Image: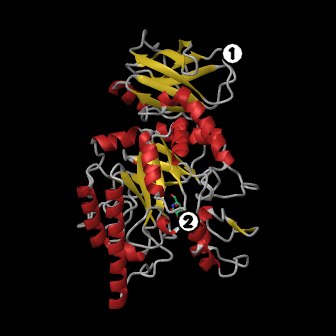
Amino acid sequence: MNRLLRKSLLATALLVATATVHAQWTGPKAKSTELKEIKYGPLSPANRDDEAMVAFRNYGLGQFIHWGLYAIPGNEWEGVSARGGAAASEWIRAWRGPDTPKDWVKTYDNLYKQFNPKDFDAKRWAKQAKEMGAKYLIFTTKHHDGFAMWPTQYSDYNISKSPYKKDIVKEVVDAYTAEGIDVYLYFSVMEWNNPDYMGKEPKTAAEKKKFDRFLNYTRNQLLELMTHYPQMKGFWFDGTWDQSWIKSYDFTYKLEQELREKHPGLIIGSRFRNDEYGKRHFDSNGQMLGDYEQGWERKLPGDITWLEGRDWDCVMTIPPNGWGYMKDWSGIYTKTTDDLLDMLVYSASLSGNFVLNFGPDGQGNMHPEEDRLAKEIGDWMKVNGEAIYGARHAGMTNSKLGYFTKKEDNLYLTIFNRPINNIVRISVPKTATEVPVTATLLANGQVLEVKHADLGIDLDKNTYYDVVVPHTFQTDRAFVIKMKVDSPKGKAEKLMDAKM
Ligand code: FHN
């Protein structure tokens, strides 16, 4: 779609709700009018346009995998559920409350002695991700428990000490890369069982010495990951909210510089570090600290204005919360294929990527429900992916029927709520110089009739284009109408505005 149509469509106000109610924004709400002197601000330009970042922008759909020792208990231990006692399944080491098993932390920290996933096949996972339509993967190299899924030389708490022994990160990176899926390495800075780690700001000389050791260890591990897996495209940082890390802004600034120098094109989200005033994600002047907004965890922006042109992705669980394996999905709402497609298309309509999380079990198998969802999403993407990959915000307000995306001069409307009369009404300003002229169904290539409807509503600044969906077209999922835009054939009628 050209700029003019985009501009004129932007002016369109459709007084309708979007198909899903989305959570509240977590980004900066008010910008300070007084600019602060900031030494530790952004290290990369806003809206990078290099090849790596353009690829990131075009992914559309990604896969997150949380896999580690927490996969063994699967949110329960010896028949006792950790629900309500642990914040999430991958947080089970921090299980608190009356049901916590005796000596639980010790038991957990020794789980590595039984980590031997006999069914693990990275190629099978990668094939499934490809079939689902994922273009990038975020894989947990080390979660908050501190257990490294690669044979790091900087800690003994790693995969080489488990009966499995082999380098899981390597297997995953190789298999996904071979399928053409870009890999990002999830890395938790915070470590629960590392004696050098502390949450509070180190104050005494002894504390400072200890935490410096931890910082050095973190740096070593990150450099090691980049060296071992040079195909990786970026880091997905987590566990960076503690005061110890926040106060280490000089260290983290220099580390980010070093990582970027050593790996040109590296992509780092806004969770890695903060400025000298302790501001995370955005510095004290509201500038994003990283290449994309990384705060959309189990939440979505309300509309395009919330994003202010920034790149972003949304990471989403299938259960309400819980990223690692959860054996028992009963009694909780787990998102359906339709829920997830809604969030995926909604994200694309706001120029963001949607990343769906999977939590394989201790043997290396996805949950059977995850297998089913992956298959159903993949089936949908094979037909309709054109409306997602490389597609951007269309400059139109999303309608109650579904979500608009655009790519070149193609306008896509993914319909989630099919009108009872099968007429898909698209509203454009009367002044628009380009309007929908042809339409087809992505599902079968069928050409659809497009009719101009001048409603003649007094003071209405819009005019309408009706796309007729044949009654004979039946589907039980969202479907996409692809439209070409061109200059309007006739002028919208100039009707008299009534005097009041
Ligand atoms: O605490 C983690 C959580 O376990 C999970 O890894 C998610 C994924 O985005 N991040 C953290 C919370 O923000």
Residue at disc 1, CB closer than 8 Å to ligand 1: no
Q: Are marks 1 and 2 in contact (CB under 8 Å)?
A: no
Position of residue 229 in the picture relative to residue 135 (left or right): left
Query: Which residue shows up at 59% across the image and 39% down it?
Result: 342
- Which amino acid type corresponds to the residue marked 1 in the rendered image? His
Task: Rate crowding at label 1 as few (under 14), some (14 to 19) or many (20 or more) other CA atoms within 10 Å.
Answer: few
Distance of label 1 from label 2 (alpha carbons): 59 Å
Q: Neighbour class for label 2 at 10 Å: few (<14), some, many (≥20)? A: few
**Residue shown at 48%/62% (left/top)?**
149
Secondary structure beneath dot 2 equals loop
For residue 329, side relative to residue 302 (left or right): right
The residue that label 1 is drawn on is 471
What amino acid does circle 2 point to? Pro
- Which residue is nearer to you in this view: 303 or 210? 210
In the foreground, 195 or 224: 224
Q: Is residue 22 above or below residue 258?
A: above
Residue 419 visible? The answer is yes
Q: Does 499 sit left or right of 82 as displayed?
A: left
Q: Which of label 1 and label 2 is nearer to you?
A: 2
Write down the residue under mark 2.
163
Q: Nearer the viewer, residue 184 or 56?
A: 184
Question: Which quadrant would residue 215 be assigned to in this image?
Answer: bottom left
Residue 9 drawn above or below residue 350: above
The answer, for residue 204, to whether it is visible in the render is no
Residue at figure coordinates x 61%, y 52% from the top left: 119
Residue 423 % position (x, y): 62, 19
Residue 112's place in the image compared with 262, above or below, is below
First-in-chain label (1 vs 2): 2
Residue 369 picture location, percent across and down: 68, 46
